[in-house]
Amino acid sequence: MYEMTRETLTRDRILRGALAVADTGGLAALTIRSLATELGVKPMAVYHYVANKDEILDGLVDQVFSEIDLPSPEGEWREEISRRMVSARAALRRHPWAIALMESRRTPGPASLSRHEATLATLRQGGFSVVAAAHAYALIDSYVYGFAVQETSLPIGRPEEMGEVAREIMETFEGAYPYMTEIATEHVMQPGYDFGDEFEIGRELVLDALEVLRRRGG
């Protein structure tokens, strides 16, 4: 926390402070009072720059979107969309609380709108029909957001812990689930396994499927 007076307070600093609170304690920890404490000001000072918490949430969502790379319609669509998927996953790993908010806000900001527009433009310029572009966009976000939820929900802190957790589960059930045991022993419990690597496999499969969709025209 750092000291700040009302004269030096700005909307941008308020949003950066809110981002810090949310990253530390999740959205449940974000209140006007906790935000004011983070900023070193009185709660009423915050209301001079934002009307309410909803405006703060809208601003936070736009900040997270601003961290996602803009795909270029002039580039090769697969490379551009792949880069966007990697960047979006990275942003959601930094701000896991944002997953539930990314598509739920009713007043999107400029960063959000510009990235939606750029993604659609990349798909359309890449040869996707209007309908196919809509289907493609839904699939892209479903995969990235879904993987981010799964990744941040795992009861592990480090990649090497996955094998330990799998071993404990297998010992508990003593071979009652042979296919789960097979996956655990021959894949998950092998040296170097990292669940995060599954994202790359899935990303390539999604991109392959999008190519099929592009050729069919939706």
Image (spheres, rainbow, N blue to C red):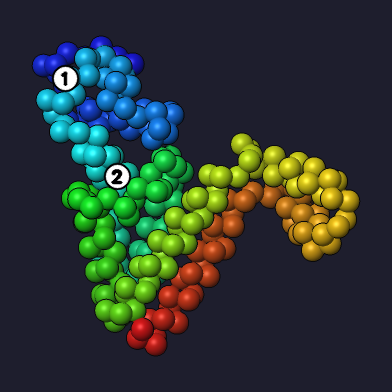
Q: Is residue 161 left or right of residue 18?
A: right
**Few, some or many C-alpha atoms within 10 Å of disc 2 (few <14, some 14-19, many ≥20)?**
many
Can see residue 67? no
Mark 1, other Cα within 10 Å: few <14 / some 14–19 / many ≥20: some
Return the x and y of residue 16 as percentages of the image width and height: 28, 30
When asked about the image quadrant of residue 41, the answer is top left
Left or right: residue 153 versus residue 50 is right
Q: Residues at badges 1 and 2 in contact (C-beta under 8 Å)?
A: no
Question: Quick check: 59 above or below 35?
Answer: below
Quarter of the view holding residue 31? top left
- Number of the label disc, if any, that sits on residue 35: none
* Lateral position of residue 30 relative to residue 48, left or right: right
Circle 2 sits on which residue? 61
Residue 218, horizontal then vertical, whole percent: 36, 84
Q: Amino acid at mark 1?
A: Ala
Residue at (85%, 46%) from the top-left corner? 171
**What is the three-letter code of the residue carrying label 2?**
Val
Rounded to the nearest whole Å, what is the CA distance between mark 1 and mark 2? Answer: 22 Å
Question: Is 110 left or right of 188, judged from the image as shown?
Answer: left
